[in-house]
Image: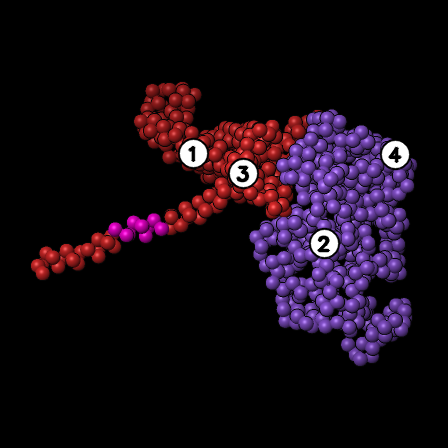
Amino acid sequence: MTAAAVKSHEAAPRRRKANLLPYFLSLPALLVCVGILIPFVTAIYYSLLRFRLNLPMLKGFIWFQNYIDFLTDATFWHTVRVSLLYTALTVGVELVFGLTIALLLQKPSRVNNVISVLLLLPLMTAPAIAALMWKLMTNPNFGVLSYFVQLLGVSNFKWASDPNTALFTVVLVDVWVYTPFIMILLLAGLRSLPQQPFEAAALDGVPRRFVFFRITLPMLMPYMVTAALFRLLDSIQQFDIIYPMTQGGPGDTLLVFQVRSYLEFYQYTNVGKSAALLIILWAITYALSNVFIKQWLRLRERARGLA
Amino acid sequence: MSDKAKDFFEAFKAGKMSRRELMAGAGKLGLSAAAANFLLNGAATRALAADFNWKKFSGEKLHLLLNKHPYADAMIADLANFKTLTGMDVTYDIFPEDVYFDKVTAALSSKSSQYDAFMTGAYMTWTYGPAGWIEDLNQWIKDPAKTNPNYNWDDVLPGLRASTAWNGVPGGELGSADAKQWCIPWGFELNSITYNRKMYDKVGVKPANNLPELVETAAKLTKDLGGPYGIGVRGSRSWATIHPGFLSGYANYGQKDFTVSDGKLKAAMNTPESKDYHKLWVKMIQESGPKNWSTYTWYQVGTDLGAGASATIFDADILGYFMDGGDNKEKGNLGFHAFAANPAAKAPTPNVWIWSLAMNAASKQKDAAWYFMQWASSTEHDMFGARKMDFVNPVRQSVWKDDEFRNRIEKSYNGYLQQYEASSPGARIYFTAQPLFFDVTTQWAETLQKMVAKQVPVDEGLDQLAASIDKQLKDAGLG
C-alpha cells in the first residue's frame, strides 16, 4: 500500500464524520420540528373526522365536511370578522401608543429609563390576571373605572356586559397589557437608528415633522412591522383576556376563534370541529404572516438603502 | 382515649343512650365538645367496620380529583377516619370550579389512571358515561361482597338516585330500570328564593309567590331601595346560567327543553308558553337585574346578596345558606322561600345540581376506589358533615330527620328548613338527558343574553335557537 493510499484510507472515516456532523447539529431543531409537526398533522387528521368524544359510535372520516359546515355557517363568519377586527384594533392602537411613548422616551436619561421600566409592569402581569383585575375595575357596582365614568356624566355604562361596548373593553385591556411590548421594541429600534441622516437633516434645518415622516418612520418601519407581526400572531389567537371577561359574550359578540375552539373541545367534546377551527385559524395566521414578512423584507432593504 | 371513654361512645353508637346523655357524660369525663365529636365519629367508624372487611385494601393508595367546595372540606376533615378504618392512604388534588371541569375532561379523555375517583355533577356524566370514561356503579352497589351491609343505598333521596342514573339513550328517562348509575349523589342544591329580610321590611314587600309577582316585587325593590338591585340571577354565557332558577321556573310552567318521539329529539323552547315565560324572565332582568348580568356566575349572584348589593336571588338554596353566615355583611339578615314560578302551579319544581362522586374507568384500583366512595357517601360521613361542617344539603333521608342537624339549621338559618321541605318533593333534574347538553345550554344562555341586550326579540330568538338546535341534533344523528 502506498503512503497516499494509507492517507486516503485514514481520511475516509474523518470525512464520514464530517459529513454526519451537520445532521447531528441539526438534530435538536429536527426534534423540535417533529414535536410541532406531530400535533399539527394530528390536528389536520382530526379536522377531517366526525369526532365527538361523547358520541364515539359516530366517529368516522368525513373529509372536509367540518370545514364546509363552518364556511356555510353565518356564526363562523361572525367569528372571522370579530377575530380580525379585534386583531386590527389591538395591533393598530398599540402601535400608535407604543410609538408615541417610545418617541417620548427616546432620549436616554435617568428619568426616561425609570419610566420605561415602570411602563413595562403591565407586561409582567399574566393576561388572565389582568382580565380579572379589569373585570373588577369595570364592575358597575363598585368598580373604580365605573365610578370615574359616572363622574364624567356617563351613567349605566356596562363595559364588557353590553354588546355595544364589549369589544371596546377587551381591546382596552389588551392595549393596557401589550402596549409596553411594542413600546420597548420601538424604543430599542429608535435608539439604534444611525445618526447621520438626522444630523444631516438638522444641519439643513429640515422641519421636525418632515424628519419624522421622511426619515424616522421609514427607518423604523422594519421594527414596527416586526412588533406588529408578533402582536398580530398573538392577537388573532386571543383567549386569555376575552374568555375570563366575557366567555365570548354577550351573545356571540366576542366569540373569537380560540374561545370558540376551546368551547368546542372542552365543553362540547367535539374534537373534529375544534381541530377544524384551529386549522382555519392557522391558515389565516399563515397568510397574514406571509404578507407581513414580505413587507418586512422589503422595508428592511429600503431602510438599508436609506442608511 | 381511656377505655372508659371509649366504652361510653360505643354505648351511644349501640343506641344505649341519647345524644344529650352522651354529651353530658363526655363533659363529666373532661372531654371538650370538639374532642367528643371526634371520638363520636371514631366510634361511628368502628361501628361501620363491624360487619365488613374494610381492611381488604389496606396499604393501597388512592388519588382523588376534587373541586374546592364545602363538601370537599367536610370530607377532608373526616378523612383520617377513613384512613384508620381501611388502612388505605388517600391523596387529592383540589381545583377551583372555574377550571375544575376542564381538568376533569383532560384527565378522563386522556384515559389517565392518575385519579381513581372524582367529584362531578350529574349533567357531566351525560358526556363522561357514553364516552366510556366512568364506571356504572351498579356493579358495586349491588354486590354485597363489595358494599358494606350498612350502606343503605335506599336511604339516599330517591329523586337524587334517579337523577344520577341514565341508560345512555338520548332522551331516556333518568332513573329508568335499565339506567346505569354513573355517579353517587354526595351533596345537592335545589333552587329557591333567598331574600334580604331587612330590605324587604324597609320597602314593605313580601317574598313573591310566582314569577309575575317576582317581576313586580324586584322592580319595586330596585326603585325604592335606591342602590341595591331587586333580583340576582346568573347570566354568563354558560350552561350554568340555565340550570338554576331559570330552568326551575321553566319547568314549573310545564315547559321542556325537548320533546322525544320515536327516539328522536326535537327542541321545544319555542312554544307560545315558553315564549311567554322567556319574556317575563327577560323583563325581570332588564328592569331589576344587575347591570353587568351577562357576566354573572353563581359567585357574583351570591356575593352581591351577601354584601347587600342585591335584595333577592333565585338560585341555589345553599348559596343563600352560605351568604347568611361567615363574614358576610348581611349575615343573619336573609330569609328563605320556596318558589313556584307559575301562578297556576301547586308546588315548586326546583331543578337540582348534585355534587356527586364518580369512578374513573381508567383507574387501576376500582374496588379500593369504591371503598372510598361508599365511605364518603355513607350515613356516618353524611351525618358528620351535616352536623359539624357545612355539608348542606345532605343527600340522605336519615340525616334530614336528625334532630341535631335540624336544630342547628333551624336556629341559625331562618326559614331554611321550611323552604327545603316545601321545595324538595318536586326537586329533580328537569333537563332531558342527552349528549349535546352543553352545546344546547350554552347556546340557550347566549340567546338569553341577546334577548336581554335587545339584540333579538324573544319570539325570533327562540325560533332561531330551536332551529339551530334541531340542526345540531340532526347532524349528531339524534334528531
Could you tell whether B199 is left or right of A126 in the image? right
Image location of residue B149, percent across then percent down = 78, 68
Same subunit under labels 1 and 3? yes
Callout 3 and callout 2 share a chain:
no
Q: According to the image, label 1 marks what residue?
A: A226
Q: Secondary structure at mark 2?
A: strand
Subunit bearing disc 4 = B
Give the vertical position of B104 relative to B203 (above or below).
below
At mark 1, the secondary structure is: helix
Which of the marked residues, 2 or 4, is nearer the chain's N terminus?
A: 2
Three-letter code, disc 1: Thr
Q: Nearer the viewer, mark 1 or mark 4?
A: 4
Q: Quadrant of residue B66?
A: bottom right
How packed mark 3 is, by other alpha carbons closer than 10 Å (few <14, some 14-19, many 20 or more), is few
Instruction: Provide residue B189's location: percent of width, then percent of height.
Output: 78, 49
Horizontal side of B96 relative to A299 (left or right) equals right
Q: Chain of mark 2?
A: B
Q: CA distance from mark 1 to mark 4?
A: 60 Å
Q: Position of residue B97 (x, y in %)?
A: 67, 49
Residues at badges 4 and 3 in contact (C-beta under 8 Å)? Answer: no
Q: Can you identify the residue that label 3 sits on? A: A62
From which residue to which does the magenta span run?
A19-27
Circle 4 residue: B213
Q: Amino acid at mark 3?
A: Ile
Give the residue pinned by disc 2: B180
Residue type at mark 2: give it.
Lys
Which secondary structure dominates the residues rendered in magenta? helix
Q: Chain of mark 1?
A: A
Chain in red?
A
3D distance between C-alphas at marks 2 and 4: 41 Å
